[in-house]
Amino acid sequence: MLQILIQGLLLSGLYALIAMGFTLIFSIGRVLNLAYGAYLMVGGYIYFWVSQSLGMPKLIGVAVAAALGVLMGVLKYRLIVKTLKGDHVAVEISTLILAVVIQAGIVLVFGDSSKILLPIVPGVINVAGASVTFNILIATLISWAILLGLYAFVRLTHTGRAMQAVSMDAKGAAISGIDPDRINLITWGISGALGAIGGVFFASYTQLSPSMWVAPLIISVAVVIVGGIGSILGTLVVAHIVGFLEVIVVATLAPELRGVFTMLLIIGVLITRPQGLFGREEL
Amino acid sequence: MGLRWFHFALWGGLIAGMFLLPQVVSNGTLRTMIFANYLAIFAISWDVLSGRTGYVSFGHPFLIGIGAYTTAILTKRFDIPVEISIPVAVVFTMIAGLLVLLPALRIRGSYFALVTLAFMELLYQLVQVIRPDLTGGTRGMSGIQTLTRGAANGYYLSTALMLAIAVSMWLLMKTRLGTALSAIGMNEESVRGSGLSTTRLKAFAFLTSAMIAGLGGAFYVHYLGSLAPRALFDINFLFTIIVAALLGGTSTIIGPMIGAFFMTFLLEYLRPVLPGAERYFVYGAIALLLYMYQPKGIVELVKRGFKNLSKGRTA
Amino acid sequence: MIKTALLSGTCIALMASAAGAEIKVGFIGSLSSDTGLSTLRGAEIAIEELNAKGGVMGEQITLVSADTGQDPTEGVRAYEYLAETEEVDFIISGSIDDVSLGWLPRMQEYRIPTLDTWTSYIGIIDMVVEDPESMTPYFMNIASDEALATLYINFGADVLKDKMGWESVVILAEDTAFGEAITGLVTEALAPVAGIEVKDIITYDVATVDFAPIFSRAQDTGADFIYQVSSVNSQVVSSQYVKLQVPMAMTGVNVSALGMEYWEDTGGAGGGISTLSPVPSVGFKLDPASQEFVDTYQAKYDSRPLLPHFNGFNAYHGLKQAMAAAEEAGGFDNVEAWAEAMKKQDLVLDMDGELWLRYAFWGDDEVEPVTDRTYPHNARFDLSEPFDDAQPSMVVVQWYEDGTAAVVYPDKYATGEFTLPSWVSE
């Protein structure tokens, strides 16, 4: 029981971190960035290259990954989202194509065999019979810190409040002097960085492989749908629902069914309560 | 309904051309065309649902997979002849189509796309877990009965199937029903306002799309002779279907066909030049650039080309 | 649009048939995996050496490759491409199980002599037994996986039970056909033959990302050690075992630990892991002929895999044998004659005057004494000491915590000792 609690908390923290960047774009730009999983993948691979192949310090690896995430986010906004002028379906389809292209690029550069990231923070402690790596513990703590930071940023800073305004009503925000283009650009950049950092932790928790982008994308989709648009709090809560659901299913039912309930949750919520469990709150 | 003699002449020419092809081209090319034919069927099926009504499906492999798995299981595990198993597979796929319709009654746009993606992932996980003795689990199935032997026979069968579906869809879309479906894609509210039942229209579109997907999936698996969940419920497969429909041009019949042939031959002709992983990269990049350049597809490009031509002539 | 596609299609087909005055070998497999590249490069080197000696039947050999991307459907297309566009005479395959199963119906249709070097799936050999006529062109020159479990049982009796004193095991197997088959074979024989009690069998999904709860369950059984059965993403299991420092010994089958790149790919989180491996494996002492192949290989290629996997050796020797068979049979066109000649190929590689490796095939009706069944068209292997008929089907490989690897079983081939990870107390 305690084991489930610990493992559930840790996994959920990681999921919250992964889903955050995806939620952000969906709230502010109202588009689904299906290449989001690819940010995570690129982040993980770049970290692997910098810190494990080149042997640079781990912090530099994370920084390079985050910087590349920002770059990818900004480029995608400039080259794809703006070019398609907010046609949501076109953006979604082009990001899907982009994800497939990035996957092929990863195979091209790194080959298709899986790679294992060393723990960012090595070490293990034993809590109530469950082995807990420092790595996932740190990932969870960082995830909480980032979420709180983001919450504060959105609530307290000028840019953050502008983001909120764009999220609620882009036209109204434009009238009151906010440049939605700039806000979108910032949001895409932040989302890219969050994705890349999340990717480093996700990959150090699982593995690197060219098809690793699908699982975090599905998790993000689940969190966004079940949580509803634009709620940092909703993201946090639902990440825990999804995380605990998985841990409980693995521990009590069968490990093979781990993803099945997440899918059923998505379908169930969308059919019965399309606006998500937490409706539309402010960002 | 805007039927003109030259429409029939064009179809007739295409049909005659496609059936004479084995006299001219090599078996290798025919093999590629078989895959193009099946991709065209899938793209037409996707277009009936998504291109027309605007309900973008990211889970089309879900429908295709139901058709493929049903007939594969029936023939391989229960020795049921294909004459029975394929129709049963189509019926099952149509029932699955109704399942996808459920969320479409309440949500649209991005949310609908996501729920279909969830359907695909759900089936992917379920076939590996539930009754692996029937589905073959993670490994899938091989040694499934094939309907034809040899390139030419496979080509004739797939071409006949593809053309039959294309022509009947074309005729269907020329009716008022087709117009109404496209109208849903443009503005669902106004269709409802004009007194038509959008639910019934959507149900019709979903069932038609599922029927084509089921037919295509069933014949496809009896052509391949094997089936693997990893390849079937794959975002890359989904990507090929959607891009074929989009690159050709949605809301047309010839568009998805052109797109399917373009995508299949592009990948095949890159093979001798780029045998390795570069191939998929270049292939995806070309698809992305073309889509960004003209989201309405090749048909639109050709139309514009003609317009410019005729303008040039009158001027 | 369609028209131009057709025109260029005909052109390519014409060019292909114009250049037909040579022996054309097709490679099928993934061009971006170590597995696929091992076979491809083994074949490349064999072809270069044959061509340098004047080719086969006076003709030079050329090689074309078709990428499968490890996708069964792509595999079917790749096989069709080789057969109908390239019109190859012979196909060498580095495909994984699922991909081979995908293109096998095509092989039966085209009847092109085909040699599989990686997949060891016993189901394919069963197909040869059941339908020898349509499987005539097929050969598999790696010992099929039925033989794998047998060697493991002996390892269990000799080392795990006698030397380590372990009496109970918990099996940790992936939920795949491979996992199921190996688990079945191991559980049926482990108790009666080796006297090791199977406490529990835990199956896990191949997409599992977090093994912490699964390792907790394994520890709760109170067994002496864990037996791992993983072919897909197996480095995830073993690296989490290392990262979590599970205080319990683990051995078994870990497919990703079969290549030298295992260490780099896991960032060193792979020490203490042991696995069954087909031969020659990492840490395997090589006979002079195989060593020469490795030297040529390493002089020619400087990208991964730096050491060819076992299937690279299979491809190198197997391709030469296929060509020798063609010379005897007067080419590849008469498949029956070629297959008969192929069955007679026999390459014995000695080391210090002893039989070390042997590349030969089982006779059609020859019954292997230990498993009491036939293995037509399958590589010859030996399941009992002193391995004087052929090499063992598998060896046990140990990765040490300093990044080196050695063969630890059977004794004849051993280059190191079976050890426990430093965090596991005996």
Image (cartoon, coloured by chain):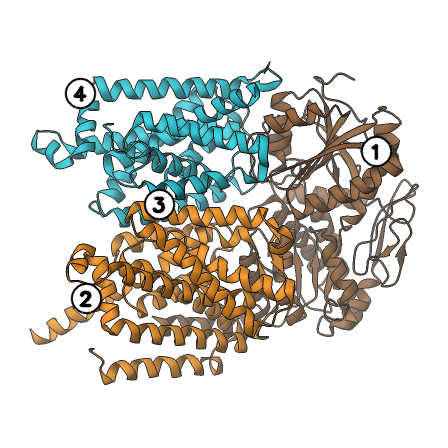
Chain colours: A cyan, B orange, C brown
Q: What kind of residue is marked 4? A: His
Q: Quadrant of residue C189?
A: top right
- CA separation, marks 1 and 3? 54 Å
Q: Quadrant of residue A122?
A: top right
- Indicate whether B35 appears above or below C277: below
The reply to whether the C-beta atoms of the residues labelled 1 and 4 are less than 8 Å apart is: no
Both labels 3 and 2 in a single chain = no
Both labels 1 and 4 in a single chain = no
- CA separation, marks 3 and 2? 41 Å
The local secondary structure at tag 1 comes to: helix
The reply to whether the C-beta atoms of the residues labelled 3 and 2 are less than 8 Å apart is: no
Both labels 4 and 3 in a single chain = yes
Image mark 3: chain: A
Q: What kind of residue is marked 2? A: Arg
Q: What kind of residue is marked 1? A: Gly
Residue B49: which numbered mark, if any?
Answer: none
The reply to whether the C-beta atoms of the residues labelled 1 and 3 are less than 8 Å apart is: no
Give the residue number, with chain letter if any, for mark 3: A271
Please state which of residues C43 and A168 is positioned toward the viewer in this rendering.
Answer: A168
- CA separation, marks 4 and 3? 37 Å
Both labels 2 and 4 in a single chain = no
Percent across and percent down for residue B128 are: 58, 48
Q: Residues within 10 Å of mark 3 (few under 14, many from 20)?
A: some
Give the residue number, with chain letter if any, for mark 1: C156
Q: What kind of residue is marked 3? A: Ile
Residue occupying image coordinates x 34% and y 35%: A224
Q: Viewer-nearest of labels 2 and 4?
A: 4
Q: Say whether residue A151 is left or right of residue C55.
A: left
Give the residue number, with chain letter if any, for mark 2: B304
Image mark 1: chain: C
Residue occupying image coordinates x 28% and y 48%: B109
Give the residue number, with chain letter if any, for mark 4: A158
